[in-house]
Image (tube, rainbow, N blue to C red):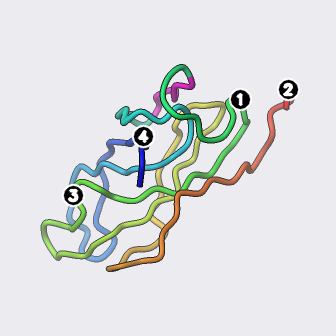
Amino acid sequence: MGVASNLKTDCACPACGHEDVYFIQYKFGGCWEDVYSLGDKISWERGIPHGDPGHALVRVNGISVVPRKCSSCGIEDIIFDIWIRNDVIEKAVITTWGKNLDYSHEFEIIEQSDNS
């Protein structure tokens, strides 16, 4: 998988509703195994760059890595859309889940900045 960044956030399991703290791995920004929270500005100063800085809005795919399974019902591989606005992590939304999903680290520029 290589070097990535991680978002640490509280989240309810999509299958059973159990609340837990998840680490969501994604590749956008300067990736160097940094751990961010919602509202943090991502770094472009170090690590392996994925994408370009300064976009108004970007959607980034992420996958739960800790825990990989819900501690209550056991579902695996929760996939998220992480929304980054002007290089600040705005929110993470569950998109799907299930064992052995075909997953790739991708991002989509939704809105360019006025400077792009």
Q: Nearer the viewer, mark 4 or mark 2?
A: 4
* 97 to 91, vertically: above or below: below
For badge 1, the amino acid type reads Gly
Density class for disc 2 (Cα within 10 Å; few <14, some 14-19, many ≥20) is few
User: Of callouts 1 and 3, which one flags the residue occurring earlier in the amino acid sequence?
Assistant: 1
Alpha carbon distance from label 4 to label 1: 18 Å
* 80 to 27, vertically: above or below: below
- Name the residue rendered at 42%, 48% in the picture: 2
For badge 4, the amino acid type reads Ser
Task: Say which residue label 2 marks.
Answer: 115
Q: Nearer the viewer, mark 4 or mark 3?
A: 4
Instruction: Write the start and end of the magenta stretch as one range.
Output: 39-44
Q: Quadrant of the C terminus?
A: top right
**Which residue occupies the foreground of this view, 9 or 109?**
109
Checking the image for residue 5, the label placed there is: 4
User: Of callouts 4 and 1, which one flags the residue occurring earlier in the amino acid sequence?
Assistant: 4
Task: Say which residue label 3 marks.
Answer: 67
At numbered mark 4, what does the secondary structure look like: helix, strand or loop? strand
Q: Residue furthest front?
A: 2
| Residues marked 2 and 1 touching at CB (< 8 Å) | yes
